[in-house]
Image (cartoon, rainbow, N blue to C red):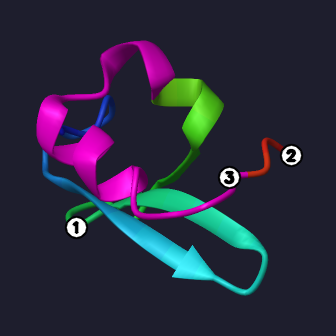
Amino acid sequence: MKCKECGETLQVQRRCRQVRLRCTGCQKEYQIHEVATDLDPETEAELERFTCIIYD
């Protein structure tokens, strides 16, 4: 999945009580609901590993 700002790859970042997507280029973070319509199959598969994702 690509960053909306710079086009670099987004990586899933899991932290205490949070799951975010962070750009490897500009370091911008996205909440899941911000990019939910643009998720690619690889990112969806990675997010499926988590039992619960809280939209905050």
Instruction: For mark 2, give the secondary structure.
Output: loop
Q: Position of residue 39 (x, y in %)?
A: 30, 27
Question: If you read the primary sequence from the N terminus, does the residue marked by circle 2 or circle 1 appear first?
Answer: 1
Query: Which residue has dot 2 on it?
Result: 56
- Quick one: which residue is furthest to the bottom in this view? 16
Q: Nearer the viewer, mark 2 or mark 1?
A: 2
Mark 2 nearby-residue class (10 Å; few <14, some 14–19, many ≥20): few
C-alpha separation, residue under disc 3 versus residue under disc 1: 21 Å
Q: Which mark is residue 24?
A: 1
Going by the numbered disc 1, the residue's amino acid type is Thr
Where does the N terminus fall, quadrant-wise?
Answer: top left
- Quick one: which residue is furthest to the top in this view? 37
Query: Which residue has dot 3 on it?
Result: 53
Q: Is residue 52 magenta?
A: yes
Q: Please provide the residue range marked out in magenta.
A: 36-53
Q: Is residue 49 left or right of residue 56?
A: left
Taking depth in this image into account, of 19 and 24 the one nearest to the observer is: 19
Mark 1 nearby-residue class (10 Å; few <14, some 14–19, many ≥20): some
Taking depth in this image into account, of 45 and 40 the one nearest to the observer is: 45
Going by the numbered disc 2, the residue's amino acid type is Asp
- Residue at image position (40%, 53%) is 47
- Quick one: which residue is furthest to the front in this view? 51
Instruction: For mark 1, give the secondary structure.
Output: loop
C-alpha separation, residue under disc 2 versus residue under disc 3: 9 Å
Q: Position of residue 12 (x, y in %)?
A: 37, 64
Question: If you read the primary sequence from the N terminus, does the residue marked by circle 3 or circle 1 appear first?
Answer: 1
